Image (cartoon, rainbow, N blue to C red):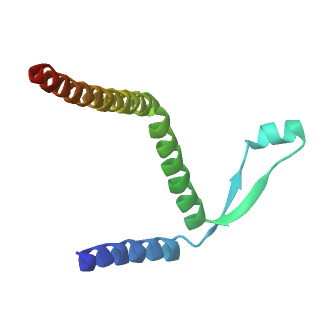
């Protein structure tokens, strides 16, 4: 199983290296269109290799997807916490009732023996 996992990650790493080598050209990444930048008097530009832009885009997409899924599952996690609290409460109640039933049964047996001896 480890061999399959290592070979999978080796193939993924090789693909990433090939993507990086084939997309080494520098590109300009602008935070806003030129017209808006000229209007505001600032033009935040950065020069990056294309593979960095691709990897950052994929990483940002993954992070947004993970965050979206975490927020979407909030209701499910809240229900699970509520059910866990309810189960723990019921367990404590059952243990308390078992203890009370065992204690009263022993007391009743003793009283029954005492009543018979009279």
Residue 59 or 32: which is nearer the viewer?
Answer: 59
Residue 116 or 71: which is nearer the viewer?
Answer: 116
Q: Position of residue 49 (x, y in %)?
A: 63, 68
Q: Is residue 95 above or below residue 51?
A: above
Q: Residue at x 54, y 59 (%)?
A: 54
Q: Residue at x 29, y 73 (%)?
A: 5
Q: Where is residue 18 in the image (x, y as percent from the top left)?
A: 44, 76
Q: Which residue is drawn at 90% across and 42% down?
A: 41
Residue 20 or 106: which is nearer the viewer?
Answer: 106
Quadrant of the image occupied by residue 114: top left
Q: Residue furthest front?
A: 118
Q: Is residue 66 above or below residue 117?
A: below
Q: Is residue 111 left or right of residue 60?
A: left
From the image, which quarter does the C terminus lie in? top left
From the image, which quarter does the N terminus lie in? bottom left
Q: How many labels does the image show?
A: 0
Q: In this view, does 32 lie above or below 58?
A: above
Q: Position of residue 92 (x, y in %)?
A: 35, 31
Q: Residue at x 29, y 31 (%)?
A: 99
Q: Which residue lies furthest to the left in this view?
A: 116
Q: Is residue 30 left or right of residue 94?
A: right
Q: Is residue 36 left or right of residue 98?
A: right
Q: In this view, does 48 lie above or below 6?
A: above
């Amino acid at each position: 199983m480890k061999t399959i996992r290592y070979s999978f990650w080796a193939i993924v790493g090789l693909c990433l290296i090939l993507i990086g080598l084939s997309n080494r050209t520098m590109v300009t990444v602008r935070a806003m269109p030129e017209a808006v930048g000229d209007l505001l008097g600032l033009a935040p530009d950065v020069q990056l290799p294309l593979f960095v832009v691709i990897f950052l885009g994929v990483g940002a997409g993954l992070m947004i997807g993970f965050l979206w899924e975490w927020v979407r599952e909030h209701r499910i996690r809240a229900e699970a916490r509520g059910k866990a609290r309810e189960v723990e409460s019921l367990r404590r109640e059952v243990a308390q009732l078992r203890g009370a039933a065992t204690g009263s049964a022993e007391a009743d047996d003793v009283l029954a023996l005492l009543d018979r001896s009279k």
